[in-house]
Amino acid sequence: MRFAVILCALLASPAAAETMTCRITAKHSCDPASGCRSILPGVWNVLDVTRHTYARCDARGCDTYDASFSRSGAFIVIDIPTRGMVAKVAADRSSFLEVATLGMTALNSFGACE
């Protein structure tokens, strides 16, 4: 019950209702053959808690997906069903993590949101 109250308070607050833009500052591509290597970010994400959407954007535009947002301690966990992606953002927006899969490659992105 306490979790539900906290989640409702978070999602009802004006700051959480706003769309968040998360800027990627570091990105790594990891696969079984090569291990992990740094790659250029070139992307950002737009999170909309009110509309339950998660957009991955680059110079060509944005791909928007349905998402669920839930609170876990000091973080907001974002699940993007059927896409092989999950993300986490600190409640104060100071840090952001996204793990996306492409085939058997994991793309790990780090940044912050505003």
Image: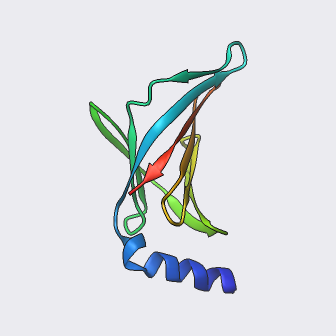
What residue is shown at x 68% (from left), y 13% (from top)? 34
Rendering quarter of residue 104: top right
Q: Residue furthest toward the right?
A: 32
Compared across the picture, whether 6 is left or right of 54 comes to right
Residue 54 against residue 31 in the figure, above or below: below
Residue 57 against residue 28 in the figure, above or below: below
Q: Count all numbered tags in the image, as a single digit.
A: 0
Q: Position of residue 57 (x, y in %)?
A: 35, 39
What residue is shown at x 40% (from left), y 46% (from top)? 45
Q: Position of residue 109 (x, y in %)?
A: 53, 38
- Residue 89 visible in the snapshot: yes
Q: Position of residue 101 (x, y in %)?
A: 58, 33
What residue is shown at x 27% (from left), y 31% (from top)? 59
Tell me how the rendering is colored: rainbow
Residue 99 against residue 75 in the figure, above or below: above
Image quadrant where one finds the N terminus: bottom right
Image quadrant where one finds the C terminus: bottom left
Compared across the picture, whether 51 is left or right of 81 comes to left
Rendering quarter of residue 74: bottom right
What residue is shown at x 50% (from left), y 65% (from top)? 92
Compared across the picture, whether 113 is left or right of 57 comes to right
Q: Residue furthest toward the left?
A: 60
Rendering quarter of residue 40: top left
Compared across the picture, whether 39 is left or right of 32 comes to left
- Residue 103 visible in the snapshot: no
Q: Which residue is at the front of the view, 42 or 51?
A: 42
Q: Which residue is at the front of the view, 62 or 73?
A: 73
